[in-house]
Amino acid sequence: MNEVAGQRAEVHMTVSITRKATGLTETYELVGQVGQVPQHPFQPQPEPDPEGDKK
Amino acid sequence: MSTTHSTAARNAATDAVTALIGASGNLKFRLTGTVSSPGTAVATLPLSATAFGASASGTATANAITSDTNATGNASPVANATLETSGGTVVIHMDVLSSAGSDRIVMTGGLTVGAGDTVTCTSLTYTALPA
């Protein structure tokens, strides 16, 4: 069974925080990554050797 | 094997997700949690009545976001951010990282919001299916 998984969705944002204590403003570039990479429900099985029974 | 989507597919996916936010949703910065059990909110920034513009090249840009001028704050660093409906239903739940770059500030101690701080988001883009 083929399994297709794309890249994770992303949010990019610029956030500024003005500190109440000092009045200073800090600016940050943030990257939000959405969701998790899906885990394989089982390990793929190796293909049977078609010549195996003839050896 | 790599996976790619057409621009039309990417736009459709992004627009479908942002439409779920609905009218007057919120951007919230939170402590650690999950989409079904979000962490404590430390800052709440109201989104515009229409949260995002139409997606272009797979990316939608948020319309104006109102600042939180009196954040709840917390001693622990922000770990997650959520985009949610006005009723509090989480549509997008994300881990928040700091991005490094020559023109950016790198947060070594994490993003910590203090009580009473003003938190402003000047730009926000969302991409459902990166190219």
Image (cartoon, grey):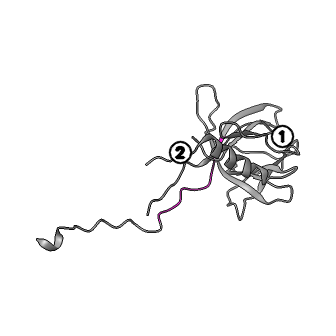
Amino acid marked by disc 2: Thr
Report whether residue B75 is seen.
no
Q: Earlier in the sequence, mark 2 or mark 1?
A: 2
Going by the image, does B120 lie left or right of B76?
Answer: right
Mark 1 surroundings within 10 Å by alpha-carbon count, few (fewer than 14), some (14 through 19), many (20 or more): many
Q: Nearer the viewer, residue B94 or B3?
A: B3
Q: Circle 2 — which element? A: loop
Furthest residue toward bottom: A53
Q: Which residue, given by chain and number where applicable, does mark 2 sit on?
A: B4
State the separation of the CA atoms marked 2 and 1: 31 Å
Report whether residue B56 is seen.
yes
Mark 2 surroundings within 10 Å by alpha-carbon count, few (fewer than 14), some (14 through 19), many (20 or more): some
Q: Chain of mark 1?
A: B
Q: Which residues are magenta?
A: A31-40
Amino acid marked by disc 1: Ile
Instruction: Please report the residue visible at 74 percent of the width from the left and 56 percent of the height from the top.
Output: B91
Q: Which residue, given by chain and number where applicable, does mark 1 sit on?
A: B65
Instruction: Please report the residue visible at 88 percent of the width from the left and 41 percent of the height from the top.
Output: B69
Q: Disc number at residue B102?
A: none
